[in-house]
């Protein structure tokens, strides 16, 4: 027989139980935070008509699409984010929705990027968006929600680096380059990764004249603190009413986020944040873990007031945030912190021969009915092999059916043994031992 | 501007908040049950090399694959189930896993089926599998887990219709058709949907002689009760040691499931259950909702001892179950029971002008810190429009900042109003009102 080599595609990953459990736990925490802020879930298909997705993110995401003809000859593609499908969704269903519409969506997205550390071709995004409202309250609520989600993950401090596309437009206006926004912002977006020299060349290629390149690179840089950054930008966008208003809104948004109790350092104005996607029209942001600045952005977001307008005449401006869990897990993995401490259940009932199986099944169910996690070892094996398995899975308590009808318990943490007549007694014994030593 | 029509592909669905919330709640309940039985999550890519997936389920799933060449020229396909990727996963990682290996996986799968009521081209599966063990304890634990999951969903009684491929092989042996198993079982699998006449024709096409067709259709039918079914099968497979052993194992599995406290009617022997997938080698089963027999199978499972052997020389027999949530939700939707009762938060803070926003943000955060769900209305609108929105979302409490510094509360259930000075007082008032009337 010819065997097929078991392997995954380049840029795609298997998650083993400890990592999958950690991620599943993170997803629940994020969902609970999203729900606490008024967001409800939706689902949209992974596959869309290609025309729905193309030309929305920009040249780069178009190139990265997994696009093909389905068996019915339709041109289809896997979604590259959750925002474009949301815009399609609200355009299609807005009459059935209560507006302003808050939705969250946890789902995979696909991008044929060059695989590299922390970057995958399939990755999980957790998005919260608010559609049908403009203004500082909407922007600020999304930022508060995002910061609360990171707090719930317990991954240490997170800084949102915040900017506004309209402020950038104001800077470009000052440099007589307002019409070059798309290539200029794309170039600027690469600054953190590729450095000033590369970006300067791209800016020149985008049509910026020599001194304008230097001026832009200088203006698009945070100063010592937000007060200094705002002061510098105020001078730079002076006389540009849209840029001035956007700058004042940014300050107001930060005020509201602080009013919700977030720490002052959790938002920093960074006029260099451009975001690579074409659909942003207002506030833009990237999230960085304070403990892992090197990993780059672990979340992003922004306002996109014209996106749904590609599908409908209804006015459906939107703002949202996206938490990239796989990048975050890759960062934690580097520190050895990505795995859940224990994927195994609380207790195992050993397999002591077929005749004892019915008792083992009843006992295990009794433990579950008492709120614990329990499994029966599923095959007849040597007792030592069963104990070794329990140890490897981090199971603390093993119960073996005795011929007399009771169960022989072993605490693998202390090595102590004890006898119990039924599940109720076992539950009491296990709880007493956890109280003494803390849960495993 | 040319607008793109907002639409989804045939057979693909959007889930609106009330339905997505119900499904998300169901997923959590199922995951908790899987965890309680010792299963931990894994994740595998949605896309695999096509050769990993093809020829594993059978002709039909091969035809239904979403298969294409990626940008790197690799032949790839979207998974059609979670079992074949699991077999690939354990073949690839078994050295890193504690065996026997219990994993659960909640994920989408894709099949280019003809769309029809309750059948989608992308649907969510919740699978629990036990790999690396054979025998009745492993089979029974999977059945117990599956029944517990349905109990947790609160969808009424569920019946597992259970059979064993080896019993069917015994029947075919008796009919001198042991070598025709693949086409015969595929034909038999269509019986519930297409009726005896169609199946009889397919059986004849598969090489079964006239009287053998009648005999098989008679034998592959449950009798009045399990005792009668087993008695009939015992006669039919007499002299076929594999079939006899399999029949005795089925009886033992049922005994263990009852020992775990499941009701006797939750398992019924049905020798007509064949399952359409080629990879099954032992027990096979389908789950039916007692309240919706017409919708057909809402879950399935079985033993596949040779599947991982397609990728590795290691012995990795498996058994598992799969709960199809989208079919279940479609059934509930027909009864008007598919939606969550309320997707909105507990409270809304009205937008009373920009000057009051900071107070509104602090107040909303205070409610969240107290464990409630709260949102700030994100735009300045007429108060009546904000109240209408709250009502539409099923939000019970609306708080409006007063010029004096306190908040004016309204209970939309009773119509009563009250004043509170801060979030703590609001929490107390809301809890008192819930205690009186029950939570919304």
Image: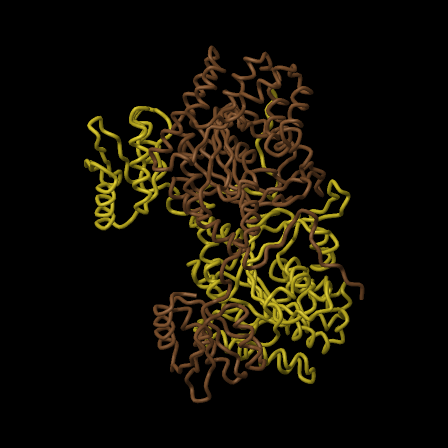
Chain colours: A yellow, B brown
Q: Residue at x 76, y 60 (%)?
A: B4
Q: Nearer the viewer, residue A174 or B96?
A: B96
> Quarter of the image containing the C terminus of chain B?
bottom left
Q: Judge from the rendering whether residue A363 lies leftward or rightward of residue A233; answer left or right.
A: left
Q: Nearer the viewer, residue B168 or B421?
A: B168
The location of residue B400, given as percent across then percent down, is 47, 81
- The correct choice, above or below, for B176 with respect to B92 in the image is above
Q: Quadrant of residue A163?
A: bottom right
Q: Residue at x 24, y 41 (%)?
A: A426
| Residue at the outermost bottom position | B404
Q: Residue at x 75, y 54 (%)?
A: A51
Q: Is residue A229 visible?
A: no
Q: Judge from the rendering whether residue A217 lies leftward or rightward of residue B410; answer left or right.
A: right
| Residue at the outermost front position | B224
Q: Nearer the viewer, residue B194 or A192?
A: B194
Q: Nearer the viewer, residue B208 or A176?
A: B208
- The correct choice, above or below, for A413 with respect to B428 in the image is above
Q: Judge from the rendering whether residue A52 lies leftward or rightward of residue A122; answer left or right.
A: right
| Residue at the outermost right position | B1
The location of residue A340, given as percent across then percent down, is 41, 47
The location of residue B39, given as percent across then percent down, is 42, 40
> Quarter of the image containing the N terminus of chain B?
bottom right
The location of residue A243, given as percent across then percent down, is 66, 79
């Amino acid at each position: 027989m010819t065997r097929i080599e078991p392997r995954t595609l380049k840029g795609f990953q298997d998650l083993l139980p400890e990592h999958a459990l950690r991620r599943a736990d993170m997803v629940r925490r994020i969902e609970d935070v999203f729900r606490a802020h008024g967001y409800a879930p939706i689902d949209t298909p992974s596959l869309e008509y290609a025309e729905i997705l193309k030309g929305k993110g920009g040249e780069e995401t178009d190139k990265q699409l997994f696009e093909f003809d389905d068996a019915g000859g339709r041109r289809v593609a896997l979604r590259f984010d959750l925002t474009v499908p949301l815009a399609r969704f609200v355009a299609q269903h807005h009459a059935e929705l209560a507006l302003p519409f808050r939705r969250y969506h946890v789902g995979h997205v696909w991008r044929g990027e060059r695989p590299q550390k922390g970057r995958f071709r399939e990755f999980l995004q957790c998005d919260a968006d608010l559609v049908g409202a403009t203004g500082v309250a909407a922007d600020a609520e999304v930022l508060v929600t995002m910061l609360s989600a990171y707090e719930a993950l317990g991954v240490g401090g997170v800084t949102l680096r915040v900017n506004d596309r309209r402020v950038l437009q104001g800077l470009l206006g000052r440099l007589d380059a307002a019409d070059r926004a798309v290539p200029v912002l794309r170039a600027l977006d690469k600054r953190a990764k590729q450095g000033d020299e590369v970006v300067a060349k791209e800016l020149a290629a985008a049509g910026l004249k020599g001194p304008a390149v230097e001026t832009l690179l200088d203006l698009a840089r945070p100063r010592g603190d937000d007060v200094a950054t705002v002061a510098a930008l105020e001078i730079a966008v002076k006389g540009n009413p849209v840029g001035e208003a956007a700058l004042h809104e940014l300050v107001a948004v930060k005020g509201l986020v602080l009013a919700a109790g977030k720490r002052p350092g959790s938002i920093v104005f960074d006029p260099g944040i451009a975001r690579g996607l074409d659909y942003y029209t207002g506030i833009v942001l990237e999230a960085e873990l304070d403990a892992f600045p090197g990993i780059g952005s672990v979340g992003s977001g922004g306002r996109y007031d014209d996106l749904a307008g590609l599908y409908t005449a209804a006015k459906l401006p939107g703002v949202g945030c996206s938490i990239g869990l796989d990048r975050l897990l890759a960062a934690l993995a580097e520190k050895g912190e990505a795995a859940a401490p224990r994927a195994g259940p609380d207790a195992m009932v050993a397999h002591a021969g077929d005749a004892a199986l019915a008792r083992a099944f009843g006992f295990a169910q009794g433990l579950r009915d008492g709120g614990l996690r329990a499994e029966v070892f599923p095959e007849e094996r040597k007792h030592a092999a069963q104990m070794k398995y329990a140890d490897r899975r981090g199971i603390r308590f093993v119960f073996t059916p005795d011929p007399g009808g009771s169960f022989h318990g072993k605490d693998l943490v202390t090595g102590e043994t004890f006898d119990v007549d039924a599940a109720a007694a076992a539950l009491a014994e296990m709880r007493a031992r956890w109280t003494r030593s803390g849960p495993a």
